[in-house]
Amino acid sequence: MPTEFYRDVEKNVRLMEEMLHLDVNNDVVARRFHAVGLSCALYYVEGMSSGESMGEHLLWPLQSSPLNLSGRNAAREVMKHVLTAPEVKTEANPRKAVQELLFGQTLILFDGCTEAVVADLRSYSRRSVSTPQTETLVVGPHDAFNETLRDNLTLLHRRMATPDFVCSIKSLGDKAATQLAICYVDGLCPRETIEEIQRRLNKINLDQVLTSGILEQLIEDDPYAPLPQMAATERPDRAVSFLMEGQAVLLLDGSPRALALPMGIWHLYHSPDDSYMRWQYGTVMRVLRLIGALLALYLPAVFVSLVIYHPMTIPMTLLTSIVQSRSAIPLSLLGEALLMLLIFDLINESAQRTPSLMGSSLGLVSTLILGSAAVEAGLVSPLLIIVVALTGLGSYALPNYSLSFALRIGQILLLLAAGLMGWTGLCYMSLLLLCWVASMTSLGYPYLAPTSPRRTHNPDIVSRQPVFRQRLRTYVSNPAEMRRTVGPMRWMRKGGGK
């Protein structure tokens, strides 16, 4: 494979036919014509370029130009004096030029020139900007990322009216390339963060990086860690908040999610709702989420441990009710709890995979029918159904799907430990999971910071304080830019409004 185009356009045409398999590939359109005194060849992928723009900005200016060019600089002269397309560049490497062509750009070859002209006239079918599917809000904007990289970058640029906002685009995949945008705010994001991201991306050796989930697994610190090490979001406003905190955001073409890194566990706990509502309401919602997380993680394990190994800690009236309800049940309490959690997860998964018009109805009907039938058949006790239902509600209260899924896995581990060893096993398993999470890092930054190890931070972890008190960025930002421009409410001072 040559490193640059030949001077003879016929050789370049044969090279393109070989690289693009034009003898059998009908999607790539090739056209030969004569313009500016030279023999030319034009290439584009059908359906990915605008024919109207091609005629207006390429073919008509070329064929009506009185210039008579020759030599190696013909492509640059055409680009400067003839073409009217907004974005035009030259590319000497055939492999890179073909990659640009497959990304939807238009390619023109000139006889006697070792460079190709690449014009951006992309126009293809795309999904319009719609509402978020998994991060819905009551108060706040309702636009979400889609599968087109350029649309997603536009959504960020609309909110980031600063020249310091940088988008560096590169290609991933050895066999089928996919475009990736590395977005950050210069000065806020540490240079070491960007260099480490670039180093990890350059080490990727894969035929194709199809989704952001695959990308996340390729560059995360520990693939065996129990929690996600990047914050995924489909909301442009949340991606902008990550950028303004000094984090980097990755956008992959074809994926409607953005990845923010580095991050800590508190990024999974917070929701955009917290910022769009009064700080008192945000604090209340965070407390409710914390209670939901504790219920989802510990309630089944604590219930099984107390009933099997520590019944004397339960009030006698409640213990009598539990014993009477379980007197005719053939399963052990541990097996009964595992069965009910499995059924609940099956209902949840089937409801998500069912069409939206039927999903909620299917989940509700299945829960009612199976719960009632299980109690009447004597397979489970009514109190355990209440425990499992509270556990499910607690997991639904979490704003991050990956976090709720991780808690469901931790829930099973804690339940098994409590069912086999009682309160002792529950404590040991909790300590083991806590040590595992404490050892995690995200791009080298401690996962539990700023609480452990302690870092200087805003009063915005569990409780949310007023905005004028949040004068610091996160610990992952550039130390020189950690203090943000948030001033006090001077109008509250006496005479401050005059």
Image (cartoon, grey):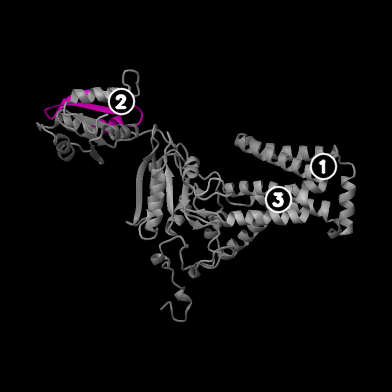
Is residue 41 in the magenta section? yes
Mark 3: amino acid: Leu
Helix, strand or loop for disc 2: helix
User: Which residue of the protein is positioned furthest toward the top in this rendering?
Assistant: 23
Q: Measuring from the top left, give residue 8's x and y in whole percent.
A: 16, 26
Q: Measuring from the top left, give residue 33's x and y in whole percent.
A: 19, 24
| Badge 3 or badge 1: first in the primary sequence | 1
Judging by the rendered image, the residue that carries numbered circle 2 is 19
Above or below 13: residue 473: below
The crowd level at tag 1 (other Cα within 10 Å; few <14, some 14-19, many 20+) is: many
Mark 1: amino acid: Val
Helix, strand or loop for disc 1: loop
Magenta part of the protein: which range?
Answer: 32-55
Judging by the rendered image, the residue that carries numbered circle 1 is 380
Marks 2/3: CA distance?
A: 56 Å
| Closest to the observer, 246 or 52 | 246
Residue 498 horizontal side relative to residue 11, left or right: right
Judging by the rendered image, the residue that carries numbered circle 3 is 414
Which of discs 1 and 2 lies nearer the camera? The answer is 2
Q: Quadrant of residue 191?
A: bottom left
